[in-house]
């Protein structure tokens, strides 16, 4: 029972860490961290999962204006096909019969320009090589995660402390698992390894927004800073998933008893 409690705690720590970096693999779909915001009349679309090949469908609250256009933030033109309240954004060589995926590099936005753009009511991102993402799946994934986490928060403390003999080393906690993984982060230089650890400590443990954490490290806003975050996020994600897979493989019997 003691070993099972530790394993479940470590797995909970891994899940919590995954949620902090936008990767909660407990529901169907591909979690790409898609988001939108309106700034000075333009609509900006972002993703937090590295380079993508996709096309995007947006459903607005009101009919789309006729002068609407779309492009990447580096100026690369995209095709914007509007039909009532629906807007499809795809590669420039797309047509009405086929929506061709465009390359969406990490660190770039998709900018939608138009007069008096209405608010986005629904969205879907159609990936070329894997299952896409929708607003409904993204919302359901967040609900599942918080339900699962609340159950763990309620049940784990009693299970761990009840089965931990007095005088022994303190039990493993969610925070200690995540911090231990962060401290294993490496880089081509000691300076970069330290920068990765400081970045993750701020985002995962202190709940700082990644953009603010990059600024705190002295990294100016831009594609290079975003690419550094995505690279660090990807490496940390790999370590978390590897830990969870290894524990499940080694101690499967304990968890199913």
Image (tube, grey):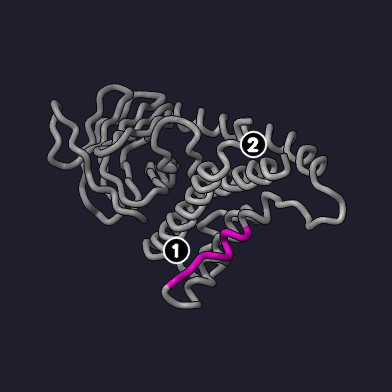
- Of the numbered discs 2 and 1, the one sitting upstream in the chain is 2
* Residue in the image at 68% along x and 32% along y: 151
Image quadrant where residue 136 sits: top left
- In the rendered structure, the answer to whether residue 149 lies left or right of residue 210 reads right
Residue 124, image x, y percentages: 35, 31
Q: In this view, does 254 lie above or below 234?
A: above
**Residue 179 in the image, given as x and y percentages of width and height:** 63, 59
The residue under the point 31% across, 28% down is: 64
Percent x, y of residue 139: 50, 30
Instruction: Give the image quarter of residue 94.
Output: top left
Q: How crowded is mark 1: few (under 14 residues within 10 Å), some or many (20 or more)?
A: few
Residue tagged 1: 221
Residue 118 seen by the camera: no
Residue 247 part of the magenta segment: no
Q: On residue 149, which mark appears?
A: 2
* C-alpha span from label 2 to label 1: 33 Å
Residue at left offset 34%, top offset 34%: 132
As rendered, which of 157 and 73 lies closer to the eye? 157
Mark 2 Cα within 10 Å, few/some/many (few <14, many 20+)? some
Q: What element carries label 2?
A: helix
| Secondary structure under the numbered disc 1 in the rendered image | loop
Residue numbers of the magenta segment = 179-187
């Amino acid at each position: 029972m003691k070993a099972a409690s530790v394993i479940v705690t470590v797995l909970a720590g891994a899940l919590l860490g995954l949620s902090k970096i936008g990767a909660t693999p407990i529901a169907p779909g591909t979690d790409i961290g898609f988001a939108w915001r309106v700034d000075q009349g333009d609509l900006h679309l972002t993703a937090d999962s590295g380079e993508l090949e996709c096309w995007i469908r947006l459903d607005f609250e009101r009919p789309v204006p006729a002068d609407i256009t779309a492009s990447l933030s580096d100026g690369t033109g995209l095709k914007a096909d509007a039909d009532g309240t629906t807007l499809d954004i795809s590669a420039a060589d797309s047509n009405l019969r086929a929506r061709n995926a465009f390359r969406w590099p990490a660190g770039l936005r998709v900018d939608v320009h138009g007069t008096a753009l209405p608010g986005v009511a629904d969205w879907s991102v159609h990936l070329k090589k894997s299952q896409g993402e929708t607003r409904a799946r993204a919302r359901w994934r967040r609900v599942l995660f918080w339900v699962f986490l609340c159950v763990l928060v309620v049940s784990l403390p009693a299970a761990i402390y009840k089965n931990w003999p007095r005088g022994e080393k303190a039990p493993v906690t969610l925070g200690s698992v995540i911090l231990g993984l962060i401290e294993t982060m490496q880089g081509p230089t000691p300076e970069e390894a330290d920068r990765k650890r400081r970045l993750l400590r701020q985002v995962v443990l202190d709940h700082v927004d990644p953009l603010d954490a990059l600024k705190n490290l002295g990294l100016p806003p831009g594609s290079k800073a975003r690419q550094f975050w995505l690279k660090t996020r990807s490496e940390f994600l790999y370590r978390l998933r590897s830990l969870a897979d290894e524990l499940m493989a080694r101690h499967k019997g304990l968890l199913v008893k």
